[in-house]
Image (tube, rainbow, N blue to C red):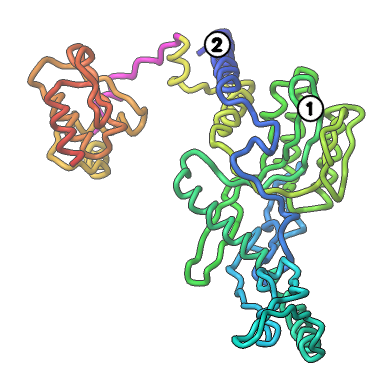
Amino acid sequence: MNAEKLRIARDKLTRVFHYLEALNQHRNPAKRQIREQPWSFWLRDLPEHSSIQRGAAKASSFKAKNGSSQSTEDGGASYVLKVQRPRLTRAPEPPEEIAAWLEDGWDDPSNAFSIEETREESEKTAAPTIVRFTDDPARAASLERWKLLRNEWVKTEKPARVAMTIFETFYALYGRIDREGERVELVLGDGILSWRRTDGGIYHPILLQRLQLQFDASVPEFTLSEADHPVELYSALFQSMNDVDGRAIGRCREELEEGGFHPLINGSTSGFLKRLVVQLSPRGEFLEDRAPNAELNDPCIGRDPVLFLRGRTLGFAAAIEGILADLRTREDLPWSLLNIVGEESPIPQAGDANPSASDSSRADSEVLLSKPANPEQIRIAQQLEEHGGVLVQGPPGTGKTHTIGILSAICWPRARAFSSRAIRQKRCAWCAIISFPSCVRVCQRARK
C-alpha cells in the first residue's frame, strides 16, 4: 500500500475507533465516586492484630529511559494483605455471688458491663425484700476481682472480634467474586483525587493495581496478591473533561509505565502524584499522609489506599485508547481492520494456495480433528486458526455440512462456515454456526 492510501486508511480507522470510544463512554461511563463502586474497603480501617498481616509492593523491574533495567526499592513481600481467622475466646465466668446481678451483654467485649443496683429477694416463709448490691462487702470485693480479669480479656478479645469481622467481610467478598468473576474484578487504589466540578464531583483513586483473592481453607486464610497486570492510571476518568489536557495525561501514563510506581510505595509514587495534580490545574495540591476530607474546588490528591470492586468494562476503554495510540505510529496496519473501511486485501499468489506436500504433511500433524478429514477441510481449520473466519463455497453434496460438524465438535463458538444457501437458514442455538438445518442436529450431538 502506498503512503497516500495508508494515510487515508489510518484516518478512517481512527474515526471508527473514536466512534467506538465515544460509544463506550456513553454505555459505560467512568465512575467518579468510590462509593459508586460495587464494594470498597479502606485499608486504614484494618485493626492491629496478629491475624492480619500487611504486605508491600512486589519487587518489579522497569525499563528506564536510558534503556537500563531498574527495580523498585520497596519489594520482597509476595502479598498485599493476609487475613486469617482469629481465635476467639469466651469472657471469664463471673462468680456465683455476682452472676445474678450482672445485666445482659457482659460477655461482649465492645460493651461495658453493668450491674443491678437493687434486687427483690424473697423466701418461702417471708415477704419479698429489697436488697442492695453494696449491702454485702464480700460481693463488692468479688466484683472488683472479676472486673480486673474481664478488663484483661477485653484488651485482647476486642481486636480479635474486629479482625473476625474483617475475615467475614473477605469471606463474603470471595463468594461474590466467585459468582460474578466475569463481571467484576478486585483492585487496589491510591492517589485519591478530590475535585468539585460542574459536570460531576470526583472522589476516586487514580492509581490502580489489579489484585487476586485466594482462600486457603486449611488455615483458614485469605491472601490478597497482585495480579499479572501492571499498575495503571485511571485515565478514563479524564477523557470526558474538556479542560484537562489529554496529551499531559498521556505523558503521565508513559511516566507511570517507565517509572514503576505503585500504590504501596511512598517516596517515588508520591512524587509522581504531586507532578500529576499540577497537570490537572495550576492550583492542584497534594497530601502526603491522608486523603482529602471532602470534594474541593481545586483538584487535590491524597494518599490513602483502598480496596474496591469494579466492573470489567473498563478494559474496553483501555484497549480502545491503546489502539488509537498505536494507530498514530503503526505502519503495518492489519488487513482485518483495513477490510472494514473498504480496503481489500491483496489476492494471494497461486503458489500460496497450493502448499507443498511436505508443508501439508507437517501442517496436518498439527491439526487434531475428531473425525477423518480431507486436505481441504484441514486447510479450512488452518484458515480459522490464522484469520478467525473463512468463507467456504461449493455446490450441494460437496461436504460443507460435514466440515462444519468436524469443526464444531472441536470448538463450536469459533467455527463459522458460510454458503449462498446457508446464509438464508437459521442460526444454530448451540454453536452460532449459520448453516443447514442438518448442521443444527450435528452440533447438538457434538454439544452432548
Q: State the image coordinates of residue 156 (x, y, percent, origin top left).
A: 72, 75
Query: Which residue does the image show at 70% across and 21% down from the upper left?
Result: 240
Query: Which residue does the image show at 86% across and 40% down from the upper left?
Result: 274
Q: State the image coordinates of residue 109 (x, y, percent, origin top left).
A: 70, 70
385 to 417, vertically: above or below: below
> Outermost residue, bottom direction?
138
For the residue pair 192 and 35, the one nearer the viewer reads as 35
Residue type at numbered disc 1: Ala
Disc 2 target residue: 12
Is tag 2's residue or tag 1's residue first in the polypeptide sequence?
2
Image marks 2 and 1: residues in contact by CB distance under 8 Å = no
Q: State the image coordinates of residue 377 (x, y, percent, origin top left).
A: 19, 31
Q: CA distance from mark 2 to mark 1?
A: 25 Å
140 to 263, vertically: above or below: below
Q: Is residue 355 magenta?
A: yes
Whether residue 155 can be seen here? no
Q: Is residue 326 magenta?
A: no
Q: Is residue 208 left or right of residue 341?
A: right
Query: Which residue does the image show at 87% across and 28% down from the upper left?
Result: 297
Which label was assigned to residue 248? Answer: 1
Magenta-highlighted residues: 342-356
Q: Secondary structure at mark 1?
A: helix
**Of the two numbered discs 2 and 1 in the rendering, the one whose residue sits closer to the viewer:** 1
> Outermost residue, left direction?
397
Taken as a whole, is the magenta stretch helix, strand or loop? loop
Residue type at numbered disc 2: Lys
140 to 401, vertically: above or below: below
Q: Secondary structure at mark 2?
A: helix
Query: Which residue does the image show at 48% across and 67% down from the upper left?
Result: 217
For the residue pair 47 and 437, the one nearer the viewer reads as 47
Whether residue 179 can be seen here? yes
